[in-house]
């Protein structure tokens, strides 16, 4: 076995870590989130997302309509499409086995985004026996929902009112199977936010096939949890929609910040105190009366101002080394999605380096938890924690699991068979 191959036992250990109970103290709650509203908030059109633009097909009505409105983006996006097509052709030729691990799980997450799945219109095997809406104490219901979701595999579950400012204006592929450009109607009172951690051993390869597979798998897993939880809420007689990764027409980051899953970091992801930004989101929108949670503040904004590790390590330079900015009416950390998308299209799949290097992503052990607590309470400790992370945890691309790394070898062995 190659010394740069991740043994199966290590990948399994990373899998088990997802379900380890966090031993540190919960992040302190506050009345307001750690972003600032400056003026009127401008809702986001999903059609403007770099990935939505990347999947526009030249010659189609959608392609012509979009670049008729945004001709300044056409040349950049066409070059991204050229790069992605070139790399896909190379991968099919050089590694036709290994290159298909990622697409297999991304296909599954797409199935879980079908409108009839997220809306719950698929005929149930067992008919719902409840004819009227279940009426119960919102605090007790919230506890039940959280316990159920934790059992299913979510590491953190929190609830907040659904702010319509975070709902997209229009749908766009590939993030939905709804008609392209359809206006979004997500008129629910609450959103149940689920955080599902990723396997650190898989994410450690940074921008390799193992990282791409892990992202797709956890997106699929998060989507499945969302579908199950939404169906449970509907069985209580209340409307609910599963917000799966390929049918979630809302801005995840501010909604999760509102719920107290974490704070937005320099990387543009939500950073959780216990497991950093190393997770993928699931959610359910519903009218079921539930007790809501508050935002949290564990000192991340000051920490990120002092720490530029993700910005320095990002190969696309999509993460700012500057301070927060006002974007569509919200002061937050900016992020250049176009640069990030170009790097993805250049390597042919997703990149998770900014998730691999974050100092908050270290295992949930007493030494790391002690640093978390001290960094939360003492601003001076944050500089020391950052310096220590640079010294002891410099970024190195980790190895692929043996079953991915050996895919090319299996092909070459077959070619040598008489």
Image: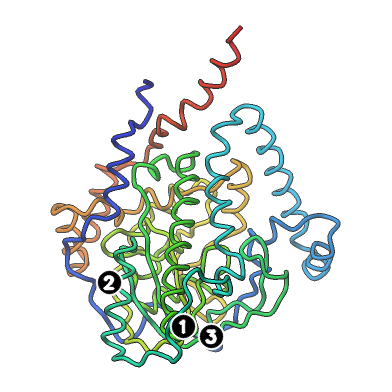
* Image quarter in which the N terminus is found: top left
Secondary element at image label 1: strand
Cα–Cα gap, marks 3 and 2? 27 Å
At a point 33% along the width and 31% down the height, the residue shown is: 7
Secondary element at image label 2: helix
* Image quarter in which the C terminus is found: top right
Please tell me which of labels 2 and 1 falls first in the chain.
Answer: 2
54 left or right, relative to 135:
right
306 left or right, relative to 124:
left
**Residue 147, labelled with which disc?**
2
Q: What is the x, y in percent for residue 326?
A: 52, 77
Read off the residue under disc 3: 164
Cα–Cα gap, marks 2 and 1? 17 Å
Read off the residue under disc 1: 286
Tell me the quarter of the picture where residue 25 sits. Answer: bottom left
Secondary element at image label 3: helix
């Amino acid at each position: 076995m190659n010394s740069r191959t991740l043994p199966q036992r290590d990948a399994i250990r990373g899998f088990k870590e997802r379900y380890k109970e966090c031993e540190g103290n919960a992040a302190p709650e506050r009345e307001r989130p750690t972003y600032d509203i400056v003026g009127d908030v401008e809702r986001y059109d999903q059609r403007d997302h770099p990935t939505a633009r990347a999947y526009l097909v030249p010659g189609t009505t959608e392609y012509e309509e979009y670049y008729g409105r945004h001709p300044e983006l056409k040349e950049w996006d066409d070059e991204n499409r050229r790069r992605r097509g070139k790399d896909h052709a190379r991968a099919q030729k050089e590694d036709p086995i290994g290159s298909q691990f990622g697409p297999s799980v991304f296909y599954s997450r797409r199935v879980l985004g079908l409108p009839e799945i997220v809306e719950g219109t698929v005929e149930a095997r067992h008919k719902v026996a409840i004819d009227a809406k279940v009426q119960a104490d919102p605090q007790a219901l919230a506890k039940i929902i959280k316990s159920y979701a934790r059992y299913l595999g979510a590491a953190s579950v929190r609830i907040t009112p659904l702010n319509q400012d975070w709902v997209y204006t229009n749908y766009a592929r590939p993030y939905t199977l709804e008609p392209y450009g359809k206006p979004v109607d997500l008129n629910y009172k609450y959103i149940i936010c689920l955080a599902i951690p990723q396997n650190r051993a898989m994410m450690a390869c940074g921008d390799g096939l193992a990282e791409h597979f892990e992202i797709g798998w956890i997106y699929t897993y998060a989507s499945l949890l969302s579908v199950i939880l939404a169906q449970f809420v509907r069985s209580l007689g209340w409307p609910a929609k599963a917000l799966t990764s390929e049918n979630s027409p809302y801005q995840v980051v501010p909604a999760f910040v509102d719920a107290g899953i974490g704070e937005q970091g320099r990387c543009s992801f939500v950073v959780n105190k216990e497991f950093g930004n190393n997770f993928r989101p699931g959610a359910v929108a519903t009218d079921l009366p539930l007790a809501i949670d508050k935002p949290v503040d564990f000192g991340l904004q000051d920490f990120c101002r002092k720490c530029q590790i993700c910005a320095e390590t990002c190969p696309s330079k999509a993460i700012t080394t500057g301070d927060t900015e006002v974007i569509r009416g919200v002061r937050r950390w900016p992020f250049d999605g176009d640069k990030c998308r170009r790097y993805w299209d250049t390597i042919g799949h997703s990149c998770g380096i900014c998730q691999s290097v974050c100092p908050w992503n270290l295992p949930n052990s007493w030494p790391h938890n002690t640093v978390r607590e001290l960094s939360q309470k003492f601003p001076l400790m944050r500089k020391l924690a950052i310096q220590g992370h640079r010294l002891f945890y410099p970024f190195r691309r980790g190895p692929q699991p043996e079953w991915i790394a050996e895919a090319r070898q299996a092909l070459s062995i077959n070619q040598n068979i008489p």
